[in-house]
Image: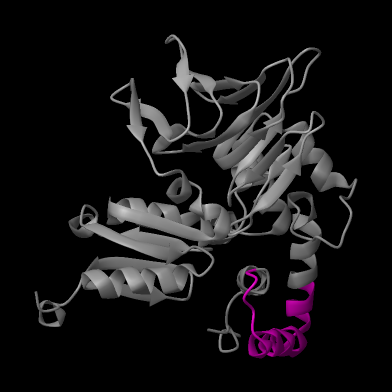
Amino acid sequence: MTRSANHDDEPGEAAIGWMVELCSGVTSERQKRAFESWLAADSRHVEAWAQLQRGLAPCGLAAEQKLPAGRLRQQLVERRSDRRAVLAGLMAALGLGTAGAVVTDRFVPLGSLLADHVTRTAEQTRVHLDDGSVVVMAPRTALDIAYAPGRRGIRLIEGEVLLLVASRAAPFRFDAGALRLTATSGRFLIEKRPDSLAATGLEGTGQIAFATQASGPIGRGERIGLRAGQPDRQPVEVEDAAAWLDGLLVAKNRPVAAIVDGLRPYFPGVIRLDPAVAEIRATGVFPLRRPDDALDILGASLNLSVTRVAHYWVAIGPGAPGDARPG
């Protein structure tokens, strides 16, 4: 879908929409030509686009530009501890309203934009640390490096990472809110989302603790999270748990809500799920880098309705009774 017909949008809102499409990694030549036509149609479009690129450079969105030392970046750094103020300040500087903030936040997690490392929606990146360890960041992930004399570590603000701990005498410490993982070597997945806080062992053995509870071991094929405030240990297939590294979501008898949650970091928009279908279970392999296709696959296989509005809004609910597949 292109935005060539949306010339009546406010220039700032339209510029955000074009930013999302052009940075999605799947832009067609037709979309690029439509963008050029939109840009040339009105001088206000040119100014809105230039303003957006200038203002979002501190977020890492203007990849061709170096970080500016101007007023906006200084303001953001000075207000680093207040993430609400950071978001409000950025939106005010860009001249965007609430709707603009919602759309922009679906492209880059604005509440964490001042972390040491941040990934955008659908972006995956690899961070090499000074001790030889490597962190692979899933989309919409933010983390801070927490090195100190005699200590190496990371603090996960939000998102999901694969941690490859380089072998050293000093243990590596990984903090994710109430979760703390320590290991001298190995590979681990750690996830911190609003509804999930867990670690999965892929290789080697580490020690995991939650808040004030005593630590315990975590080994290969174990996923340890919190359930009713207590550590919950479950076996997992290592290949399935790490499938997102290859752009896949592997679901085996998982609720629709869990599958949709897995797709959200890859979709630059809002997905609304009807509670009536949230607990339906499904099994399948879904392409994370093509979330629209994944939603269509999910809808077709379970007879769910998938309704799209303005490209950035998807509603999923029960399908029409007459469309039910024969049993």
Residue drawn at (36%, 27%), measured in percent from left and top? Answer: 226
Tell me which segment is drawn in magenta: 24-47
Residue 271 image position (x, y, % from top left): 40, 61
**Which image quadrant: the C terminus?**
bottom left
Q: In this view, does 149 lie above or below 191?
A: above
Residue 255 image position (x, y, % from top left): 27, 52
Q: In this view, does 149 lie above or below 138?
A: above
Residue drawn at (69%, 32%), measured in percent from left and top? Answer: 144
Residue drawn at (63%, 59%), measured in percent from left and top? Answer: 96
Q: In this view, does 78 lie above or below 39?
A: above
Magenta stretch encompasses residue 170: no
Residue 324 image position (x, y, % from top left): 13, 77
The answer to whether residue 305 is seen in the rendering is no
Residue drawn at (62%, 54%), measured in percent from left and top? Answer: 108
Viewer-side residue, 48 vs 116: 116
Q: Is residue 102 left or right of residue 147?
A: left
Quarter of the figure with residue 205: top right
Q: Is the magenta stretch mostly helix, strand or loop?
A: helix
Viewer-side residue, 117 vs 138: 138
Magenta stretch encompasses residue 32: yes
